[in-house]
Amino acid sequence: MTNRIVLTLLGLGLTASLASAQTPQSPTTTPPTTDPHATVNQRLENQKDRLQAGHKDDQLTKGEATKLRASDAAIRAQEKVYRKANDGKLTTGEKKQLNQELNKTSRQIYRARHNNRNPKS
């Protein structure tokens, strides 16, 4: 059973990679989504992009960036635990809890990028 699932996932991954090889590549940064139903993974990816932009623009200190990345990593880990417990699905309560955590981290990213602290040169 497990081997069958792994082979199916590998087949899907191969199909997706072949399809993406034939289509024009989109830019590496995804525009922030305003969709209220954005998935947890989409939001984490957007926050990762915001952290990279803040680092690139010297809006985040090393400590701020490290703390915010750790927060995102904790959310990813919690999502993984939830999905493992429920056959890859998130319950409504789990989605709500993860979105609250994502909202908190998003506010922290905004505040860190706009607090006028600059990394040491």
Image (cartoon, grey):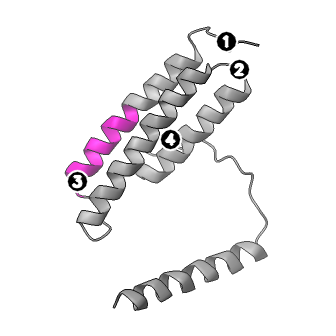
Percent coordinates x, y for residue 114 in the rendering: 58, 14
Q: According to the image, label 2 marks what residue?
A: 58
Q: Could you say which disc has been placed on residue 118 in the image?
A: 1
Q: Compared with residue 118, is residue 89 higher up or lower down, i.e. above or below?
A: below
First in sequence, mark 3 or 2: give its number.
Answer: 2
Residue sitting at the far left: 93
Residue sitting nearer the eye, 23 or 90:
90
Percent coordinates x, y for residue 28 in the rendering: 72, 51
118 vs 3, left or right, is right
First in sequence, mark 2 or 1: give its number.
Answer: 2
Q: Residue at x 62, y 8 (%)?
A: 116
Tell me the distance, in whole angstroms, between the alpha carbons under discs 3 and 2: 38 Å
Based on the displayed image, in which of its 4 quarters is residue 63 positioned? Answer: top right
First in sequence, mark 1 or 4: give its number.
Answer: 4
Classed neighbour count for the residue bearing mark 3: other residues with Cα under 10 Å, few (<14), some (14–19), many (≥20): few
Tell me the distance, in whole angstroms, between the alpha carbons under discs 1 and 3: 40 Å
Percent coordinates x, y for residue 105 in the rendering: 42, 31
- Which of the two marks, 2 or 4, is nearer to us in this view? 2
Dot 2 lies on which element?
loop
Percent coordinates x, y for residue 32 in the rendering: 58, 41
What's drawn in magenta, residue-wise?
Answer: 91-103
First in sequence, mark 2 or 4: give its number.
Answer: 4
Amino acid residing under circle 4: Thr
